[in-house]
């Protein structure tokens, strides 16, 4: 029997790795992948708890997370394409006009 | 026993893939390692008895979302990532905060967790299609519909964003 | 000999058997294709090697193996190697979910004619979400092509794979939606369940209530397998050979086999979902020994028909233009599929059998 | 409760008319507009009449007919409903309002025919009808207040109808503001009621007021409420000291002056006091105040009326003084008399205004009586009806005004415990003055040689836009005049006192109106305030004698008032017909007084110095504007803005625009939150 905490720790680690990706990667696409990674970590938590508590509703929430992730991927990648068209770079350090 | 072994294998795959995602300098490698993560997550879902979620995980994430990523990488012909360091905050604030975060979460988890293990045998699937469908289309009907609207908006947004200007 | 070992043994035997049969079938499908297309174009097709050119596939295989394996300098080595394997694996793996018939019994141990069939007394136990897994594996097939095109660092390949992946993503939607009607009727994702629910003669097959769904499925399946009339990715007139321009010898052969394997998968699924799988057109009136064999025969026969249809279409239809292709997928097939779902579910909901 | 009366339609029909005309009238032709307006008003009148018939057959148990249609405000324990409350009082009111209102609508069709903003005028007029009827039919003070404010709005809009004229716009503003002051009192009165009873519904309030003890705290409460309501009534009904808006209100078109500022709206105050008789009758002090104020106003306004030369102003002041009479009646707890006078006054004052309008119309907008004269040949019909009106208001026997006014005077004298001979005396004096200035108007307008300026008489052109020569009004204007004239003759026969019952025709027997109104307003004050009569035979006998004596006395007083009217007439005849040079002489003799009176005792200027100027200069300009607004608020705003700017100038560097930096901060925040949660977990 695998203790629940294993799954939770695993998802925590994955989540933190996602955050780390967001922090240290420069390529906007990779950063985007890190976000997906975090979402997956959260999903894992959901599923683990649903198995632990025998509550299916958690898995339903997983679906909603997936839906949001898919929508986000579609829109986000479209934005990335637009950015790339306008300034020929994917480096977020070079995309910093949003300031005073 | 077998459960534990499988868990270790795929947990390791997950972490390895995630680390590789960060280590690789080329986005396409990162993408592939992310696919690995997702695949092994799907297996973990199976271990947790959520077969439907597992299938959807493969179809949606591995089969659609990541394909989209790869497709965009190919489309933009993204190359190796440059070494630029415009953000000191990310390094001097973010990284320590991140480490603290990880430490805190793991500490909190290990200190107060339900001692009971996941009471599921391999091949015992509680997350079948029918019960989930009942939940999704009865109890959670409104959120479901709302997400459908969300998807629609996302589609339109993507089309609008990605189309070239009138030139 | 305990259960687990028996299970493994059976699984091993079945896998080997099925893969062998499948590969052979693929090989001879190429021959069939060349023959049939040849006849359609008033040619003979291959005749030299062996009687009626029956050994032609063998010769091809040997040739593939003996050819030099060229790897052009600027490719992304790892992915260049990974891509064809991915393609072939996904192509072959999907067959493992397909049930070919009811269970057989050997030495009191009975198993179902299906690689992933579990060891059980009643033949109805099956992976509850077989179809979903099948779709999942199919959806993974894209990577092979996409990576191939990208890794081989050549314009033709890149364009080809871009087209391919776009096309496959687009048609996956209508593919997935087209089978929902059947799922509603059968009320299960288990392929075996679906087949059982249309047992009892040709009139119970889902092709009749789901005629529209069937045609949507067929069309988008053709697009999924990049076959004519949707073989834009390897349109030799525009981009030399599409995503596998840079590939040669065995790597190329892998793509080749993957494509045919996918054809078989599509044929199997179509048979299972719409044509009652292994059940004959008329409920059994045959002697028991035949009862044992007939299902396999029927299944093979139906698959053959589909393969033939593939070839026939290839011999007949011209190729789409790319924008037409996309427009067709998004503006015609997808709405039709959705409409099909709505109508079906409405009927099922409001029609007391 | 019988639900077959659809009273809600009575107000809503004019509202519908107002909406249609107001929204689409611009596109309609005048014909359509007037059709809509007239139709809605006529329907409303018809419905009122029908209601009256139903009312006659209604069992006494159903009266007052009270019905709530829908909840309006539900706040905690307080609830107000949209409801109607129909009893004899409101029945008379709706009949008067819709009837006179309809006639004046008809008249306006002719009078306004050549004005701009035709649709606007009728839309406002219908709006006024709606609010007035709401006021009258309301089942609670709150809903009444809605109508109360609504008529104020309508009158504001109509006074300022010629908004391009400064004087008109200012008059509108003045009316509105002065009314505000009155409404303020009304509001506080209502607050008191809510605070005491938790509701404003008539049923509840009146029934509970009726059995409140008459001494101690509750008496003070009743007096306070009554006085505050009185303040409101003063504002609306132009009593001292808030009458100043009414004369200026004559800036509006003449039909408006007739309908709103003579016949209906200004009587709202009287109606309100009568409606609240339960409260007033139990607050003797307040009643006395009402009586005194009313009488003072009557006299005061009458004196001003003597010295005015603008025909409409004369009528305006006469309106004020007549309203004073009504308040006097209320003040002696003779509410039915007040309502009676209200009704007759509505008839003859509307008549007078409209015929004055007809005169003005004939003279193409000339309003100064010094430029009139000798018109009786030129506009005979107007002359005829005007004559009826004048005699009616002057209190000539057999005409409406006579009965109602004498009724009031008699009550003022005779009502036990409230009545007093001094009240009567001033009243009669006022009656004489009234007769004087009305006949003065009559003579100056219709007799003597024409003083009409050439430009008007011959070939002038005027804002009415048609040929200037003096001309009789069209029939659409004359017809209502004739009807009103008839009404102001027979209207009085509703309330013929017993002593004259033999001598004059009556409708429904002597004192019909009083008997009719008795259930609603209480016939005689005995019922509340006085010890019951003795029963013994002797007592009866003495009562007989008292009866005799009373009748003699009443006869005498009536004679006296007639005499007063006659004197007034003769005086006017002497000054403005026989010896037209006399007025100048007299005025030059008593020049100071005369000028004072002519300038309306300079009350407006007085108010201007007392209230308006200090208010505008000190409070508004210095305090509100310079100190509070500029000094406090603006500085606060500016400092806040400056501070924010400074703060952001320091902190803006955090906003590097680099996503990863933001991510860093977010991570920090997340770490903090998780740390907090873990810490909480360890507690």
Image (spheres, coloured by chain):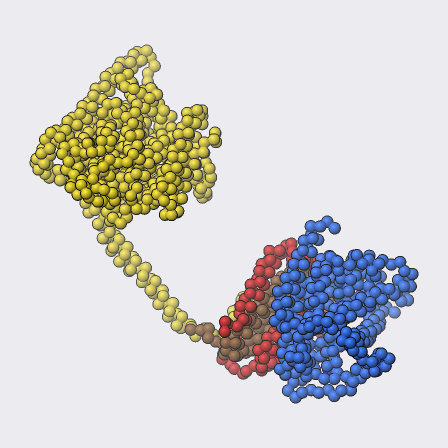
Return the x and y of residue D79 as percentages of the image width and height. Answer: 44, 40
Closer to us: A76 or D272: A76
Describe residue C267's horizontal placement relative to residue C236 as left or right: right
**Residue D292 visible in the snapshot:** no
Q: Colour of chain C?
A: blue
Return the x and y of residue D167 as percentages of the image width and height. Answer: 23, 47
Q: Colour of chain B?
A: red
Return the x and y of residue B3 as percentages of the image width and height. Answer: 74, 69
Describe residue D150's horizontal placement relative to residue B67 as left or right: left
Taking the spot 58% from the left edge, 62% from the top edge, the residue there is B152
* Quadrant of the rendered image containing residue D437: top left
Closer to us: D164 or D423: D164
Describe residue D94's horizontal placement relative to residue D302 as left or right: right
**Residue D583 visible in the snapshot:** yes
Taking the spot 15% from the left edge, 36% from the top edge, the residue there is D450
Closer to us: A29 or B124: A29
* Quadrant of the rendered image containing residue D583: top left
Taking the spot 23% from the left edge, 53% from the top edge, the residue there is D618
Return the x and y of residue C198 as percentages of the image width and height. Answer: 78, 58
- Chain in brown, by letter, is A
Q: Colour of chain D?
A: yellow
């Amino acid at each position: 029997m695998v203790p629940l905490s294993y799954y939770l720790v695993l998802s925590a680690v994955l989540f933190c790795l996602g955050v780390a990706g967001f922090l240290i990667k420069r390529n906007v696409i990779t950063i985007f992948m890190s976000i997906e990674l975090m979402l997956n970590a959260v999903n894992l938590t959901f599923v683990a708890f649903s198995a632990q508590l025998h509550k299916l509703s958690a898995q339903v929430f997983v679906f909603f997370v997936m839906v949001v992730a898919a929508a986000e991927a579609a829109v986000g990648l479209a934005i990335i394409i637009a950015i790339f068209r306008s300034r020929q770079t994917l480096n977020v350090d070079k995309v910093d006009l949003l300031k005073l | 026993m077998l459960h534990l072994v499988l868990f270790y294998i795929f947990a390791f795959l997950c972490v390895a893939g995630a680390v590789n995602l960060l280590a690789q300098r080329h986005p396409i490698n990162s993408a592939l390692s992310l696919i690995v993560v997702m695949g092994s997550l799907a297996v973990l879902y199976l271990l947790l008895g959520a077969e439907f979620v597992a299938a959807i995980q493969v179809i949606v994430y591995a089969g659609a979302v990541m394909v989209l990523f790869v497709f965009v990488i190919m489309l933009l012909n993204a190359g190796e990532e440059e070494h630029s360091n415009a953000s000191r905050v990310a390094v001097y604030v973010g990284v320590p905060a991140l480490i603290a975060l990880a430490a805190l979460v793991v500490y909190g988890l290990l200190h107060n967790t339900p001692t009971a293990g996941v009471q599921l045998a391999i091949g015992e699937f509680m997350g079948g299609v029918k019960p989930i469908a009942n939940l999704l289309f009865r109890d959670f009907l409104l959120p479901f519909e709302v997400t459908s609207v969300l998807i629609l908006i996302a589609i339109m947004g993507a089309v609008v964003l990605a189309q070239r200007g009138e030139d | 000999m305990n259960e687990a070992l028996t299970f493994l043994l059976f699984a091993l035997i079945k896998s080997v058997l099925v893969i062998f049969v499948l590969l052979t079938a693929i090989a001879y499908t190429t021959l069939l294709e060349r023959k049939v297309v040849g006849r359609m174009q008033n040619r003979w097709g291959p005749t030299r090697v062996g009687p009626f050119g029956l050994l032609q596939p063998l010769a091809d295989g040997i040739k593939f193996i003996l050819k030099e394996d060229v790897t052009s300098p600027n490719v992304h080595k790892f992915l260049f190697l990974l891509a064809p394997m991915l393609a072939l694996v996904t192509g072959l793996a999907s067959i493992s979910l397909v049930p070919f018939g009811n269970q057989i019994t050997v030495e009191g141990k009975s198993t179902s004619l299906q690689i992933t069939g579990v060891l059980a007394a009643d033949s109805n136990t099956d992976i509850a979400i077989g179809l979903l897994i099948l779709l999942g594996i199919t959806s993974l097939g894209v990577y092979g092509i996409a990576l191939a095109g990208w890794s081989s660092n050549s314009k033709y390949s890149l364009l080809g794979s871009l087209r391919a992946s776009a096309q496959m993503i687009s048609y996956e939607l209508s593919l997935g939606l087209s089978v929902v009607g059947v799922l509603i009727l059968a009320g299960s994702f288990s392929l075996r369940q679906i087949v059982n629910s249309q047992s009892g003669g040709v009139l119970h097959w889902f092709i009749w209530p789901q005629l529209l769904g069937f045609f949507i499925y067929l069309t988008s399946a053709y697009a999924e397998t990049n076959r004519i009339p949707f073989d834009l990715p390897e349109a030799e007139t525009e981009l030399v050979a599409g995503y596998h321009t840079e590939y040669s010898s065995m790597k190329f052969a892998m793509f080749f086999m993957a494509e045919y394997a996918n054809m078989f998968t599509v044929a199997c699924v179509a048979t299972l979902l719409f044509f009652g799988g292994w059940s004959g057109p008329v409920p059994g009136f045959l002697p028991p020994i035949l009862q044992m064999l007939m299902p396999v025969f029927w299944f093979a026969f139906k698959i053959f028909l589909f393969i033939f249809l593939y070839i026939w279409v290839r011999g007949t239809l011209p190729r789409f233009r790319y924008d037409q292709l996309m427009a067709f997928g998004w503006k015609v097939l997808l709405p039709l599929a959705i409409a099909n779902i709505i109508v079906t579910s409405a009927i099922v909901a409001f029609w007391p059998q | 409760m019988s639900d077959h009366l659809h009273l809600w339609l009575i107000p809503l029909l004019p509202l519908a008319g107002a909406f249609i005309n107001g929204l689409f009238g611009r596109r309609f032709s005048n014909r359509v507009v007037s059709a809509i307006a007239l139709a809605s008003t006529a329907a409303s009148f018809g419905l009122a009449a029908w209601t009256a018939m139903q009312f006659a057959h209604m069992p006494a148990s159903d009266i007052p007919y009270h019905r709530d249609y829908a909840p309006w405000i539900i706040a905690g324990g307080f609830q107000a409903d949209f409801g109607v409350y129909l009893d004899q009082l409101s029945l008379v009111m709706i009949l008067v309002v819709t009837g006179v209102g309809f006639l004046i609508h008809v008249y306006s069709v002719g009078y306004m025919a050549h004005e701009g903003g035709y649709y606007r005028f009728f839309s406002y007029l219908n709006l006024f009808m709606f609010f007035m009827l709401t006021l009258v039919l309301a089942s609670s003070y709150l809903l009444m207040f809605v109508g109360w404010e609504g008529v104020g709005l309508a009158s504001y809009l109509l006074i300022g109808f010629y908004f391009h004229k400064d004087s008109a716009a200012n008059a509108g503003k003045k009316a509105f503001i002065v009314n505000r002051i009155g409404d303020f009192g009304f509001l506080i009165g209502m607050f008191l009621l809510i605070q005491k009873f938790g509701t404003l519904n008539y049923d509840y309030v009146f029934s509970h007021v009726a059995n409140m003890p008459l001494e101690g705290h509750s008496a003070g409460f009743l007096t306070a409420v009554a006085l505050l309501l009185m303040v409101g009534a003063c504002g609306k009904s132009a009593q001292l000291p808030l009458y100043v808006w009414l004369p200026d209100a004559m800036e509006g078109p003449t039909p408006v002056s007739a309908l709103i500022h003579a016949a209906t709206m200004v009587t709202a105050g009287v109606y309100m006091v009568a409606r609240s008789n339960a409260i007033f009758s139990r607050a003797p002090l307040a009643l006395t105040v009402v009586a005194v104020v009313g009488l003072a106003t009557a006299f005061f306004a009458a004196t001003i009326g003597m010295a005015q030369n603008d025909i409409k102003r004369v009528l305006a002041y006469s309106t004020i003084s007549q309203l004073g009479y009504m308040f006097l009646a209320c003040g002696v707890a003779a509410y039915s008399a007040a309502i009676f006078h209200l009704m007759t006054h509505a008839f003859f004052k509307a008549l007078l205004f409209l015929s004055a309008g007809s005169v003005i119309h004939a003279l193409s907008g000339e309003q100064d009586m010094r430029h009139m004269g000798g018109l009786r040949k030129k506009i005979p019909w107007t002359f005829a009806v005007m004559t009826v009106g004048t005699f009616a208001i002057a209190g000539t026997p057999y005409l409406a005004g006579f009965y109602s006014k004498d009724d009031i005077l008699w009550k003022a004298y005779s009502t036990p415990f409230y009545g007093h001979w001094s009240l009567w005396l001033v009243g009669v004096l006022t009656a004489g003055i009234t007769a004087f200035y009305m006949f003065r108007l009559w003579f100056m307008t219709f007799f003597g040689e024409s003083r009409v300026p050439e430009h008007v008489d011959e070939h002038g052109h005027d804002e009415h836009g048609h040929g200037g020569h003096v001309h009789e009004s069209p029939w659409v204007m004359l017809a209502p005049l004739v009807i009103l004239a008839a009404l102001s003759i027979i209207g009085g026969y509703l309330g013929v006192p017993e002593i004259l019952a033999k001598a004059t025709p009556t409708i429904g027997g002597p004192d019909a109106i009083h008997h009719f109104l008795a259930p609603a307003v209480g016939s005689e004050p005995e019922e509340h305030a006085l010890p019951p009569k003795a029963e013994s035979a002797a007592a009866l006998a003495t009562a007989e004698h008292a009866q005799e004596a009373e009748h003699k006395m009443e006869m005498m007083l009536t004679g006296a008032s007639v005499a007063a009217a006659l004197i007034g007439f003769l005086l006017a005849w002497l000054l403005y017909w026989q010896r037209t040079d006399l007025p100048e002489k007299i005025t030059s003799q008593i020049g100071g007084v005369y000028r004072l009176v002519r300038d309306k005792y300079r009350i407006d200027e007085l108010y201007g110095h007392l209230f308006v100027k200090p208010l505008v200069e000190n409070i508004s300009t210095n305090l509100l504007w310079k100190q509070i607004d500029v000094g406090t608020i603006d500085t606060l705003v500016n400092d806040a803005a400056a501070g924010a700017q400074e703060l952001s100038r320091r902190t803006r560097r955090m906003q590097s625009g680099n996503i990863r930096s933001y991510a860093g901060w977010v991570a920090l925040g997340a770490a903090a939150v998780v740390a907090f949660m873990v810490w909480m977990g360890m507690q």
